[in-house]
Amino acid sequence: MTQETTPTAPGQAGARTVLITGAAGGLGRAFALGFAGRGYRVAVADVNLAGAEETARLVRETGAESAAFEADVTSAESTRSLAERCAEFGNGGIDVVLNNAAIYATVTRSPFEEIDPDEWDLVMNVNLKGPWLVTRAASKYLPEGGRVINLSSATIFSGSEQWLHYVASKGGVVAMTRVLAKELGRRGITVNAIAPGFTLTEASYSLMENAENYGVDRGALKRASQPEDIVGAALFLAGPDSSYITGQTLVVDGGRQFI
């Protein structure tokens, strides 16, 4: 029988545990607060421990349990330790893994011939190797009915010039999601991806002026994407109404891409 996937109220002993990487700020922090509002026990991880601790503090202010962990998603040893500590925090298990950690705003835009190979490797290590290592480490603690949610990007469908390494890394996340869905599906665990469009976070504002207007005219919905729009998709994929959905990529971009 598949494990019940409905979380309990904040603070209750039976609350489900979600592990969110890249949660020191931005979309990761929004995910943490969103899951807290649904009664989850929230483990936040980031290479920036101070930022993760601030996120955990904000989560605890909502009445939910939270703990912050320093972790480097590119390291097998660090992710192994992270999974172990999160499982202990979660009373022996992890119910939802949300692979959000990624390099985004600091990625240099340049023609493909001019991409620095070292930056290529860094982007691939964080954006693609990272979700694999975190899922590999956490999978032993995922029960039947567990969920893995990977963050891709809508840019993989449209292409984004002079950003080949970023787009390729996020395309790899979709491919990885499909394979993991089959392998973990034998244990009753679903694996899905979310492909957000341009979303208004601190990182997005740092990329350009008037970020709130970027691409709005190209969408079916004539407004900018807010973090809450992406959080809702993650909560759906983590919840009971998506228990028969796996290996899929949910595009959340206000209708800029029709796939």
Image: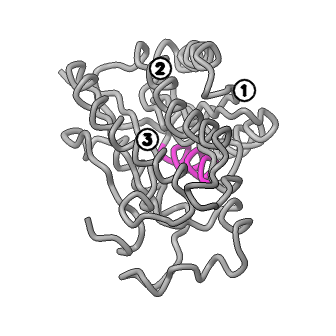
- Front-lying residue, 132 or 201: 132
Magenta-colored span: 27-38
Q: How is the image coloured?
A: one colour
- Does residue 76 sit above or below 232 in this rendering? above
Where residue 209 sits: x, y (%)? 72, 78
Q: Which mark is residue 150?
A: 3
Residue at figure coordinates x 65%, y 65% from the top left: 204
- Front-lying residue, 75 or 100: 75
User: Which of pointers 2 and 3 lies earlier in the amino acid sequence?
Assistant: 2
Residue under circle 1? 70
Residue 31 inside the magenta-drawn segment: yes
Residue 71: quadrant of the picture? top right
- Does residue 231 sit above or below 94 in this rendering? below
Q: Residue extending furthest right? A: 50
Q: Give the quadrant of the N terminus.
A: top left
Q: Which amino acid, mark 3?
A: Asn
Q: How far is disc 1 from disc 2 in space, using C-alphas?
A: 15 Å
Residue under circle 2? 138
- Front-lying residue, 165 or 239: 165
User: Circle 3 — which element?
Assistant: strand
